[in-house]
Amino acid sequence: MPRQPRTGVDEKILDAAAALFARHGFEQTSLKSLADAVGLSKAGLLHHFPSKDALFEAAWEQSRVLTRHVLDQVSSLPAGSERDRRALELLTDHALDRPGLVSLLFRTMTAPGEDPQQAQDELLLNEMFVIDPEKELPRAIRIVGALCSMAVLTLLANQQGEKTTWRPLILATCFDALGHQEA
């Protein structure tokens, strides 16, 4: 079997590491568990990333890249259901393709203060859904509910191998959580 290009390997490492960091946090995730998750020895993993800190930072940065991509795609749309739907579609597609990275991004909701740049992540999500959480608490709660549902459902879809079948159901669930009616 031909050797996988380094970028492909690095992407798989980042996604697997992000999933572990999202589930257990930085302190509770060992270098051994990270290496085991991607089928490498610790030395093999350190060949790709020089330390657990570097891997954590790279995973967070990749999560932010995904978020900025979604924000760039929806920023020209006016606030409202069309923008919300497009943001949910893009986030869901990323979550189905890179579940670990999206789980790490959403960790800002369940583990506040773990990442020093977390406030920036929250601002990106607030801008994506055009919300001031302090002034629109009910909508903020609905957004958190939609994103948490997305995180859980996309992980399950990946585990079941049913990404294509589950995608429209995940989108409908998240859109409903935001309080929008299907057209």
Image: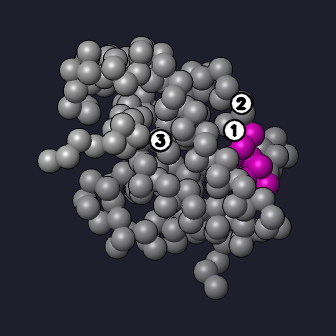
Q: Which residues are magenta?
A: 123-130
Percent of width and height locating residue 97? 41, 55
* Magenta portion: prevailing SS class: helix
Q: Which residue is mark 3?
A: 101
What whole-number distance in Å separates the C-alpha atoms at marks 2 and 1? 5 Å
Q: Which residue is mark 2?
A: 119
Residue drawn where x is 26% and y is 17% of the image? 42
Viewer-side residue, 120 vs 55: 55
Could you tell me if the residues under marks 3 and 1 are in contact, i.e. CB atoms within 8 Å? no
Q: Which residue is mark 1?
A: 122
Residue drawn where x is 50% and y is 59% of the image? 92
Going by the numbered disc 1, the residue's amino acid type is Glu
Any magenta on residue 119? no
What whole-number distance in Å separates the C-alpha atoms at marks 3 and 1? 15 Å
Residue drawn where x is 49% and y is 55% of the image? 94
Tag count: 3
Of mark 2 and mark 3, the one earlier in the sequence is: 3
Any magenta on residue 128? yes
Viewer-side residue, 182 vs 26: 26
